[in-house]
Image (spheres, rainbow, N blue to C red):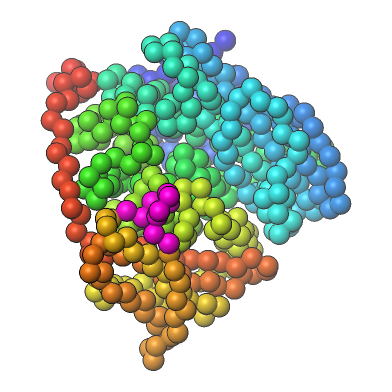
Amino acid sequence: MRNHSMWKGTGGMVLSALLLALCISGTASANNLRVSENLTPLDEYVAAPDDNYRYELRYSKQEKGFSEHVLYMASQRWLTEELVDRTLWEHWLVLVVPDEPQCSTALLTIGSGKNGGDMPQGADDTLRRSAKATNTITAKLFQVPNQPLYFTDDGERRTEDAIISHNWDKYLRSGDPIWLTRLPMTKSVVRAMDTIQDFCGGKAGGEHKVDQFVVTGASKRGWTTWTTAAVDKRVVACIPVVIDLLNVVPSFIHHYEVYGFWAPAVDDYVNSRIFDWIGSPEFDALLKNIDPYSFRERLTIPKLVMNGAADQFFLNDSWQFYWDDLKGPKYLRYAPNAGHGMDNADAAGTIIAFYQHIIEGKPLPEYAWSFPDNQSIRVTANTVPKTVKLWQATNPKKWDFMLQEGAPVWTETVLEADADGAWVGRVNSPEKGFTAFLVELTFPGLHDDVLVLTSPTRVTPNTPQHHLEMPTDFSAGFLHRNPAP
């Protein structure tokens, strides 16, 4: 049985032999690569054949106007039993299929969840809502990543960031990209697209053509939304949610210099001593393989970036390290009073409204912002919004807007257009502490859901109060132990 324990990406054994031998049962993932040359380890891993891939229909039900299906899918085999307890990645894939979809584009949501639980009993309310609102096929992939995992080097039960940070450390010491969990996470989504196309094209799935996808996911799945869009040309738009860290190094230096500590939400990376590698060539190599910022030249498709203005992982002005460098159509939303879970933000409504513009080929609103000074944001738009609001929150003690007990509350003020047709949100710099603020525009949607977009978040005063002492000892790194000749 083939596995990927011997796979090495660029920087190791190039996968050219496997790429030349591509013959994937049912689909040819290599044919869907967004690029055909200068392949990265991520491209190579996704395209590599794996005869462990398969899917089975486990449950179906017919409702008025649509059907629901639950599929079991094995996406790949990753690592070996000598390294980890679970090598076969298994998932639930839930689909909602209208009887007569309006187009051949599907909305795919990347979800989390643990292995070993019960099979989903059909679609959740959000999946049904999206399908009914758009009359398109919608799907949700679970168990990205597969978890929990037990690695033999320490035997600890690991989930989510504890898996990723553990394996970052493995890569930084070995240089083997197989350890980068983003690779199998991305491949699982690519396999889900293969499955949706094959299943929906058959009798059980209604014999519907699917040839394009809009992909969305949150947090680790938001990161995987970016990487899936980077490698697979079937993705025609993407909606990454609460993964406000593109261009990781300056973003996290800023994180520390604002807080003076690493936020508790990133403790797994602290425990794996990942931040001790910042500034090393090994860490730069890691990010070149998986940081969406490294793939920005490819990511020219329409994109809606959604974040919580009170996120517990990322600072709400992290946009400054990547936004201007993103290519192609791009739209932004920071949700006030929303943390990493985007609670009470109706993220689904914004996703649906954006998705409807994509599938119907209707122009999205164009808007722009500028910063006349440190206390104001000026916004213009070519489509008249339904409402425009200034949102602000003040912490009188420190630069900290994380959603937690005692967190500052964001308050709103309705803005009116000035004589030039612009909206200007202006705040006073506080006598003590810091004020965060943004301008929110609510545009009419094509149907029932409105499209909520915002300016970036700004903070005044905007001078960090701390300094990160950069690490200097990288002697355990693979590039220091095995320097290039």
Q: Position of residue 399 (x, y in %)?
A: 28, 55
* 35 with respect to 118 (left or right): left
Q: Residue at x 48, y 72 (%)?
A: 441
Give above or below for 193 relative to 465.
Answer: above
Magenta stretch encompasses residue 304: no
In the image, 339 versus 384, the foreground residue is: 339
Asked if residue 308 lies left or right of residue 25, the reply is: left
Main secondary structure of the magenta stretch:
loop
Let me know if residue 401 is in the magenta part: yes
Residue plotted at (70% across, 44% down):
124
Name above or below for residue 438 compared with residue 312.
Answer: below
Place of residue 126 in the rendered image (x, y in percent of width and height, measured from the top left): 67, 50
Image position, residue 278 (x, y; %): 22, 35
176 lies above or below 287: above
In the rendered structure, which segment of residues is drawn in magenta? 400-409
| Camera sees residue 373 | yes
Give the image location of residue 343, x and y in percent: 54, 53
Instruction: Tell me what residue is drawn at x 27 percent, y 20 percent.
Output: 173
Q: Quadrant of the C terminus?
A: top left
Q: Nearer the viewer, residue 276 or 426?
A: 426
Place residue 454 in its image quadrant. Answer: bottom left
